[in-house]
Amino acid sequence: MLARFRPTARQAAARGGVAGTVAGAVLAVLVAASHVAAGLAEWWLVVVVFAVPAAAGAILGPAFVGESGADADDLGIHRAPANPHALAPWRFAPWRGIVDIRAERRGPRTIVAVYLDSGAVHQLAAPYDGRLLAGDPDFERKLFTLRNLWETHRSWEVHG
């Protein structure tokens, strides 16, 4: 393995926190609605039901997100083996088949896009850069590492 790219600890915690916050908001609405219907006014219960999933998501986020990403070796770029949340059904992109590796904006994130000679474009799950906790201070270095590996291993044949 020449390089491994995974979300940073902050990115994993942020993803988990967002998922927990969404789950907590849904639970809080359900609990609030049931308490209003029952005539109960326990506001603290709604706060607890919202806060606990949000905190649990931030704490457990790295356990669920930590193995998403990409690996690079002498053959090409592989999707991380334990990546059940893959954005695309690709598993491997050989160096000879890659025509470009670029940083591209996708919504609030800057991601790494791998362009193949077949016309397909693979979006890597990591590395990426974003706002606030989704930021990766080493994103440029990781992108440069991937591009350098590609330049080192690629074929200089003209595709036609």
Image (cartoon, grey):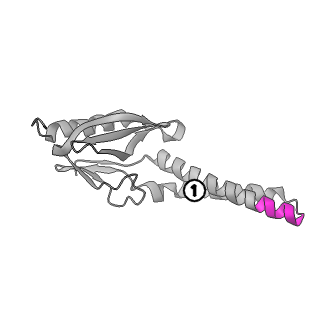
In percent of width and height, residue 22 lies at 62, 53
Label 1 secondary element? helix
Furthest-left residue in view?
157
Furthest-right residue in view?
39
Residue extent of the magenta highlight: 31-40
Residue for badge 1: 57
Q: Is residue 12 above or below residue 108?
A: below
Q: Which residue is drawn at 43% across and 46% down?
A: 8
**How crowded is the residue under tag 1: few (<14 C-alpha within 10 Å), some, or many (20+)?**
many
Give the quarter of the figure containing the C terminus: top left
Res 131 visible = yes
Q: Residue at x 22, y 36 (%)?
A: 148
In percent of width and height, residue 143 lies at 31, 36
Furthest-front residue in view?
160
In percent of width and height, residue 53 lies at 63, 58
Q: In which quarter of the image is residue 37?
A: bottom right
